[in-house]
Image (cartoon, rainbow, N blue to C red):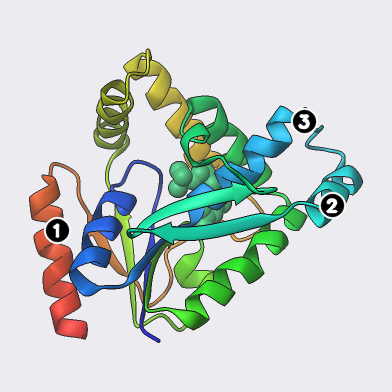
């Protein structure tokens, strides 16, 4: 099976690029952030204390997570309920960043991700795909951009989805998440040794796509 790993901080354009590429290449696209968001959605709704690791493990051991791809669109079911439309709110982003630092949460989702990659040609995006989940990926890309660019993109995206939000709040949350995600002990966001780093600051989506497509053509 062929695999492409795309890692990078939030708002770097990973999922937009991965979605387009997956259609062009006929690969499955797995948005791993959505898995962390989904688990965190459940834990947040249950008001679970993040420091109570025994309770966390207990809940995870009885939690069912299913991923379905319908018309190349990923749907996530937690305990048989489709929660895909409930996981994009800023409070879920922040909860996902916090819960994803917990050992048992990462272990719970590790197998799920690896199993899917064994059965499909796949593009996965996240924080630890090139380093931990797909260390032998055929291509690893680390997509980044400066904080202002990323915050602006995310702000426009959330506004487009009808969310009432301020740019400064988006930027502050993003900065906090970047810090959490890159300084945690378990699988922090780092650049894999063999990754191609692309800084998309000031780039349009088309330009980013052009750059990535050239790299893919050279590799496959
Ligand atoms: O990609 P995203 O913004 O949807 O991810 C939400 C959070 O989930 C992110 O802040 C950190 C965590 N995450 C992770 O730890 N590892 C991944 N592979 C993907 C996401």
N-terminal-most mark, 2 or 3: 3
Mark whose residue sits in front, 1 or 3: 3
Q: Which residue is drawn at 22% across and 73% down?
A: 25
Q: SS of the residue at dot 3? A: loop
Q: Residue at x 28, y 57 (%)?
A: 19
Residue density around tag 1, few if under 14, some if 14–19, many if 20 or more, within 10 Å: some
Query: Where is residue 99 shown, x and y percent of the image?
Result: 67, 43
Label total for image: 3
Query: Would the CB of label 2 be found within 8 Å of ligand 1?
Result: no
N-terminal-most mark, 1 or 3: 3
Is residue 209 or residue 183 the one in the foreground? 209
Q: Distance between the residues labelled 2 and 3?
A: 14 Å
Apparent side of residue 134 relative to residue 6 in the rendered image (left or right): right
**Residue 181 visible in the shown view:** no
Is residue 75 or residue 15 the one in the foreground? 75
Q: SS of the residue at dot 2? A: helix
Residue density around tag 3, few if under 14, some if 14–19, many if 20 or more, within 10 Å: few
Residue of label 3: 46
Query: Would the CB of label 3 be found within 8 Å of ligand 1?
Result: no
Query: Where is residue 127 shown, x and y percent of the image?
Result: 48, 57
Mark whose residue sits in front, 2 or 3: 3
Q: Distance between the residues labelled 2 and 1?
A: 40 Å
Q: Which residue is drawn at 29% across and 59% down?
A: 18
Instruction: Give the number of the disc on residue 57.
Output: 2
Residue of label 1: 209
Is residue 204 or residue 3 the one in the foreground? 3
In this rendering, the answer to whether 133 lies above or below 102 is below
In this rendering, the answer to whether 29 lies above or below 25 is above
């Amino acid at each position: 099976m062929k695999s492409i790993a795309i890692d990078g901080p939030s708002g770097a354009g990973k999922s937009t690029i991965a979605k387009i590429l997956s259609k062009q290449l006929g690969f499955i696209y797995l948005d791993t952030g959505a898995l962390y968001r989904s688990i965190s959605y459940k834990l947040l709704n249950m008001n679970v204390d993040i420091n109570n690791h025994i309770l966390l493990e207990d809940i995870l051991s009885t939690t069912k997570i299913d991923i379905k791809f319908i018309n190349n669109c990923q749907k996530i079911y937690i305990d048989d309920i489709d929660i895909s439309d409930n996981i994009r709110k800023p409070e879920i982003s922040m909860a996902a960043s916090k819960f994803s630092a917990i050992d048992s949460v990462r272990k719970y989702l590790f197998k799920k991700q690896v199993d899917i990659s064994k059965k499909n040609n796949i593009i996965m995006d996240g924080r630890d795909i090139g380093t931990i989940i797909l260390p032998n990926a055929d291509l690893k890309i680390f997509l980044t951009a400066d904080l202002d660019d990323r915050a602006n993109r995310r702000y426009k995206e959330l506004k487009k989805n009808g969310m009432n939000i301020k740019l400064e709040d988006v930027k502050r949350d993003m900065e906090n998440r970047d810090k959490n995600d890159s300084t945690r002990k378990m699988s922090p966001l780092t650049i894999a040794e063999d990754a191609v780093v692309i800084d998309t600051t000031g780039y349009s989506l088309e330009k980013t796509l052009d750059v990535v497509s050239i790299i893919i053509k050279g590799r496959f």
